[in-house]
Amino acid sequence: MAVIATSAVLALAGISAVAHQLLERRVKGKLTYIHTNDTLYDKTKYGHILDYDKHSLILHGQPTLILSGEFHYWRLPDQSRWRPILEQYRSAGLNCIRIYFHWGFHSSKQGQYDFSGNRDINYLLDLCEEIGVYVLAAPGPYICAETQAGGFPIWLAAMRDIRLRHMKTNFWKTYDPEFMKYCIEYFENILPILARHQITNGQGGCVLGLQIENESFQHVFHYPIGLHDDMRMLAKTARDCGITVPLFTNDGFEEGSFIVKDDPKKKKKDFGVDLYGFDKYVVFTPNSEPTSWVVGRDPSYLQEWDPSTVVNELEKMEKKVRSFGHANKRTPIFIPELQGGWFNHYGIKYTYDAIYRFYGDNYTRLMLDTVFSQGCTMLNFYMFYGGTNWGTIGDPDVYTSYDYSACIRENGLISGRLRNLRKGLLFLQSFSDIMARTDAIQSSKLQSVRSSLDKTISFQRRSLAPSLGCTHGPVELTFLRNFSSQKVDCFDLFALSKTGNVVTRLSCNLAYKASFIALGNYTTINPDIHLILSATPIHIRAFISGGNHNKKKEVWIATLAEFGATEMAFRGDLALTSLGGQHVGTAGIKLRSSADDKDVKVVTVPEGAKHAHVVLSSAAAVKDGVAPKPELHIIFLDKATLSTLYCYYDNRHGDDSSKAAASQPKIVTWGSYNAFYNPHTKILTADSTDSQTELHVLTFDQDSSSFLPLQNETIYGPSLAHQVFSLKADGATTTILHRSHAQWVKENHQGMALDNWEIRRSDFGTMPWQDCPRKSKGSKWFKNVQLDYHFTSGHILYRGKFTTRERAGTPKPRKEVWLNFNMRHRITAFVNGVAIGSHMVYSRTLLSPGAKVGHDPISFGGHKFLVPQRALDRGVAQLNANAPETFHVQEHEIILVIDSVGLSRMPFVLDDVRNPRGLLSASVQGKSVVKGSESWQVTGVDVRDLDMVHSSTGFPDEHQQTGWTSATSHPHVDPDQGGVTWWRTRFEGPPGALTESGTTLPGDQSLTAHVPLCLQIEGEFSAMIILNDVLVGRYFGSDSPQHDFYMMDGLIHKAGSGQSNELKLMIYGSTQAKPVDESSDTSNNDNKIRIRLLPWIVEDAQGQLNQWSGNTQFDAEEDFAKEVQAGPFWTERQAFHLAALSRGE
């Protein structure tokens, strides 16, 4: 029996192997005349500008880290915000962005492409070049991105004969040349624009690489699925359109897709692209992680994430990626999508604020440090700023907000997560020469640092770049990450000699689930000053070149420990030539010898200091009075101060070989909410909250008259170009403006006046109805669905008619009438103008009715409403010619308002984009219903007639200007008053603005306010939110967690502009909803409508708790509001011209 069983297993294995070979042969395709070599990056021609090796990109001969954040211009309906958001990316320490270019956003009609206005990507790339960020361009054609149809045009999705993404069905692709024809057309329209901005043009271009397709697996768990012909044609088209930069991919996870083989000439059937990239999403919220797709979860369930998830997902990443071999042995480890938060779904009971708390302030920094411990030098955070699914641009996975709990929150607030991440990014930028080329220390026996606490050292690496004047070997990076089971913050680090002996013991303070990269074995600009290990994070390294009798200096900015002493260990005969600080205590700052090795000196700053500084010199030089050697100047700042740290790096590489190192900071500031330096205008702008009063500025370019002069003595030590500027107090006009801004916020923080409402009702009788045919005679199923009509934005409306006949004069109650239906996704039904019910068919689990992704079993999900007698009584009486006195005959009208939450996006290997939406089936049943009397019609908005296909409510009368009358009350819902009402009012915007040009002139009147606004809605009803003619949000009551909607700054006319703002709401529901009387009504027992427009009320609004989460606290209890320092969030911008200030102007 064992022999038989073994033989059977071997036979099955053989069959499986043969089947696998056949599948592999199938996906290799037939277009083998297009070779990998035909589309490879031309290093011979362009390598002097852009090159790469196994460690990093090399730009103009310099190894370069790519620190990028995702940016979706199409999720900002107001183009004027592109600049301020991108400036926030730059001020966060990023040097690059990745952009998904959205095909459907640019092509509303077949054969037409729009790259103007809010779709002007040439302007966007110009902006990137001006601000100084590189671009990783991802034009798809498929982009996923939780957007309708994955970014494909609606007109293309409606062509049912086209196999989008070549998907014939779920998990099976067959190459479709007709689909490819349209992809080529799209590339031929968009790629020439991108080509004009390539770095390889040699004219300061920003585009570094072009992504081909998106998450197009070659294999999924070893199952061949990806089509080589697809990648061949897209890559060839890119080259034909003038793309000369490297092409790259992004696997959905590490599967080794489309890697260039070692000898591509011999492997013509295998196609690969230049750079292999892969996505890393590590920790999912409980209602998003894969098992929840099958078993479902309590929508309010949110538990603490397990650190082992990070360990399991990331600890072997480098080894796995290198194991794919071939080009992966010679190219950088590249993550085009590294998790920067997560999105939220319909039906969930918690908001993005809860998701932000779930991940915590340190999560994105943790991702950064952990992937760098695995040798990654190219990464892009998805998302860095999420933006808004304005209009109907989102797919069924997401609602209006795409906040993503990202580093920059939806309303533009810079979160605590960004502030922690920035400290890590500044370290990488400052030490980029060291960090760009490292190798792992594989054996724990070779590691030079040990910890007293378990699970606090994740990895060590050695730099391949020589340290300045180094005689001690390569620089060592210790990746600290506190996943200790004890969850304590304080522990000791032991620096070890090459023989494993302890040379010193240092106190380290690191919060649970936090991380940093500890610098070690580093020789400074003075070879006599050698750092053994820093047990505290170093954030910035800068240099002062000397001259004018000043010494050369290397300057560090580092963290003061929250608990315990702050310590760094050095080797050498050192002297403290200057020290000082605030709250350093009686113990003071010390330079002590290590108890384990007398040649080791430990700098110790006592606990409790707010800031401190030390200057280290060679002791012999100080003693003998010989020519001064360079000094090491360390500035220690506390956590709260460091949360405001900003650094400007001139790291746009050029051909000038004499240019200073890219890692050299030029300007460092702290004390303001945010800062940004514009090198073109020489203006430093600082945004500050009401409580911030001082801006500290350090400059490090002594050869430029644009920067500040050296000061003999400062509070942070001698010979620094340091100056303190007053915020909001530099002149009479500035003071008046500040008081005016503060007064406006005070008067409106509980809600701006929204009065003088006007109202009109949708007249369904005048809408352009068309017949809605059945699949066959007698079938309850309709032939066409939403996509067939091109009614894909927002609502699709149905009108049904039926007749009832009952014997006249009967004293019995009327016979029951039921409306049976199956639809996707949300329905509110009216019979004879009376609302009879609302329902939603939507599921977060696979293979369920209304499944947000994957197969949707449309035979399931049916529902029915009982038509109440008060609705039937409103039917129109019909004369019965045969027996007018015997029967009571009435004709009834049904109006179904169905709101689709979008077309699915075809993630990975799922073919779900054409899952039906709208009304799938309907029938009216009851003993009194006349057989054959039922008929149906449909109407909506054909998106091919729109300028932007995702910008409509779906109501044909949405732009109607007639029929408005003054309302006698605030917005409300009366289910017996028939259908849908439109409400509008006008309001004056807040003061000030962030200018589109981004250049605020310095001077007494330069103070401008930034007060982001929120529309807060409560109540059980549905509403479409239209701000100044732009559909900015959709409110779904309890079907969606969102009740707070961002009113985009760029859409709002500010006070003093001479223009007021129009807020328009389309409202409907099936239950009574009365407006709240704010003066007297505090009851929550009834369904009340509450609509408020006010500044965002957030935790730690002034940053005094050093949290800056951006989490909302609109109606917190008074004690809790005080505890979390809740208040209105607003800032003021001030401009400083450093060149003028240095001249005393």
Image (cartoon, helix red, strand yellow):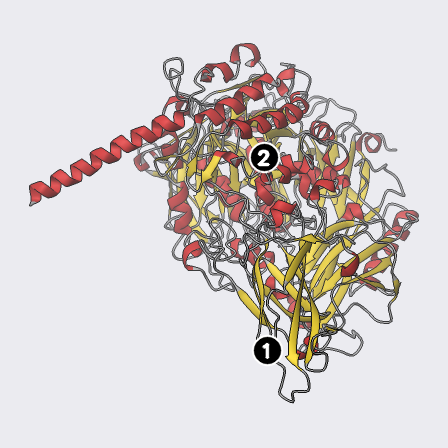
How crowded pointer 1 is (Cα within 10 Å; few <14, some 14-19, many 20+) is rated as some
Mark 2 belongs to which amino acid?
A: Ser
**Element at label 2:** strand
Q: Position of residue 172 (x, y in %)?
A: 42, 37
Q: Position of residue 22 (x, y in %)?
A: 31, 29
Q: On the rendered image, what quadrant is the C terminus found in?
A: top right
The residue shown at (65%, 87%) is 810
Left or right? Give the position of 179 relative to 117.
Answer: left
Does residue 600 appear anywhere in the picture? no
Which residue corresponds to the image point at 37% horizontal and 36% vertical from the top-left? Answer: 448
Q: Is residue 874 left or right of residue 823?
A: right
Are there few (<14), some (14-19), or many (20+) residues within 10 Å of tag 2?
A: many
- Spatial CA distance of label 2 from label 1 is 62 Å
Visible residue check, residue 400: yes
Q: Nearer the viewer, mark 2 or mark 1?
A: 1
Position of residue 1059 measured from the top left corner of the image (x, y, whole percent) = 90, 49
Q: Is residue 21 left or right of residue 403?
A: left
**Residue type pointed to by label 1:** Glu
Q: Which mark is residue 623?
A: none
Q: Which sits earlier in the primary sequence, circle 2 or circle 1?
A: 2
Q: Nearer the viewer, residue 749 or 1033?
A: 1033
Quadrant of the rendered image containing residue 945:
top right
Which corner quadrant of the image does residue 209 belong to?
top right
What SS does tag 1 mark? loop
Residue in the foreground of this view, choosing between 611 and 707: 707
Up-down relation of residue 1073 to residue 145 (above or below)? below
**Mark drawn on residue 68:** 2
Nearest the viewer among 389 and 514 is: 389
Q: Is residue 311 above or below residue 1067?
A: above
Question: Which numbered dot is residue 816?
Answer: 1
Q: Quick one: which residue is furthest to the bottom in this view?
A: 811
